[in-house]
Image (cartoon, rainbow, N blue to C red):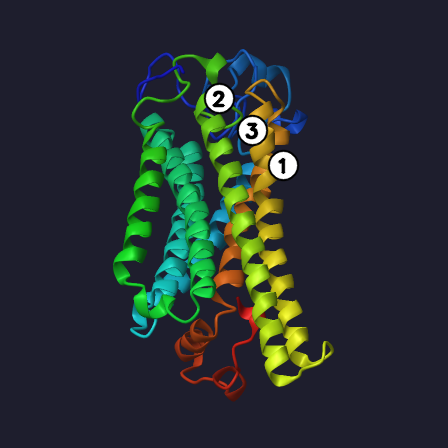
Amino acid sequence: MATGGIMSEDAAISPSWLSPDPTSWASGGGSLLTDNSTGGLGAFPSEDSLAAGPLPLLVSPWDIVLCSSGTLIACENALVVLVIWQNPGLRAPMFLLIGSLALADLLAGLGLVLHFTCAYLLRSDSAQLLTVGLVVASFSASVFSLLAITIDRYLSLYYALTYNSERTAAFTYTMLVLLWGLSLCLGLLPVTGVNCLAEEASCSVVRPLTKNNVAVLSVSFLLLFGLMLQLYVQICKIVVRHAHQIALQHHFLAATPHYVTTRKGVSTLAIILGTFAACWMPFTVYSLVADYTYPPLYTYATLVPATYNSVINPVIYAFRNQEIQKALWLVCCGCVPAGVALRARTPSDV
């Protein structure tokens, strides 16, 4: 694995994620990633090239999309963090994990916006390395938080009668410390020298991360996804078994509303896992097989959907929660509608 210092006079970071050529997006390139052009990294077109052709666009539309996504992600998750922070009733371990997810996505959104700012306004090598590290750490913490929420849901169902009474805050805090500590370590790698500034041939599809660095991140994601899949399969089995036991006790028929809500619960779990896979799997697989010589267009086409997962997370994990809904209504209008206050929890809320 090739390493490079935080700053280098001979090899500077490109204006954005991908390409040293700000106009390469027009031919399938971009600026957040890398391509195999021969121009100096971070260098703008010379006066001769400007005179020979039309004036190039110096801001990639793809980077504008990423910056816009980052703004939406930051605003949306900031609302969740604010509600959980200000409401003393939202201190249960489940809400701490949801808050961790929202905080990670909030930092990821801010990282995307800050990277755009540093790339096109500040043009500082060290600042761009810091923002790349922030983005890596934040998205890592987001994925780890999703795994922690899945573990919490599985244990709360598997030990339905005793888990809440035996579970202590220390267990949740331990998971939070581990996931944020590991995410911080991953984010510090490019800042502390594990980058491809000194050797462009070692670059991955996301500059300045090395191919080996991205491979470790991608394989880790696949392992985490496999674990989440197994846990959600077990959750589905528990939900169906509990519903069957309740049906036998109350002599329900298969067409009763309880079975309908149980099927909704299983469908909700499928939607949660399917959305997660649809957002992250394309970029994960692509980053394993591609390198910096691939057209940056492909990287943007897989990276942008991955950021949308942080837009969807608050909808799935926060805004659907009854207690958070009540807190949001209190913050927005100072009252709670009767339909929200009286809504009973169903299996579809898992």
- Whether the residues at callouts 2 and 3 have beta carbons within 8 Å, the answer is no
Pick the residue in front: 14 or 166. Answer: 166
Residue 237, quarter of picture: bottom right
Q: Quadrant of the N terminus?
A: top left
In the rendered image, which residue does mark 1 sit on?
301
Q: Residue furthest front?
A: 248
Q: Position of residue 245 (x, y in %)?
A: 59, 74
- Whether the residues at callouts 2 and 1 have beta carbons within 8 Å, the answer is no
Q: Amino acid at mark 2?
A: Lys
Q: Residue at x 62, y 72 (%)?
A: 244
Q: Earlier in the sequence, mark 2 or mark 3?
A: 2
Q: For this view, does 26 lie left or right of residue 218?
A: right
Q: Callout 1: few (<14), some (14-19), or many (20+) C-alpha neighbours within 10 Å?
A: few
Q: Residue at x 46, y 46 (%)?
A: 143
Q: Position of residue 22 (x, y in %)?
A: 54, 26
Q: For this view, does 124 lie left or right of residue 105?
A: left
Q: Is residue 245 above or below residue 168?
A: below
Q: Earlier in the sequence, mark 2 or mark 1?
A: 2
Of marks 1 and 3, the one in the foreground: 3
In the rendered image, which residue does mark 3 sit on?
287
Q: Residue at x 48, y 21 (%)?
A: 211
Q: Amino acid at mark 1?
A: Ala
Query: Residue 238: in sight, yes or no?
Result: yes
Q: Residue at x 52, y 69 (%)?
A: 320
As helix, strand or loop, the secondary structure at mark 1 comes to: helix
In the rendered image, which residue does mark 2 sit on?
211
**What is the CA distance from the residue labelled 2 to the residue labelled 3?**
8 Å
As helix, strand or loop, the secondary structure at mark 3 comes to: helix
Pick the residue in front: 271 or 202. Answer: 271
**What is the CA distance from the residue labelled 1 to the residue labelled 3?**
12 Å
Q: Position of residue 182 (x, y in %)?
A: 33, 39
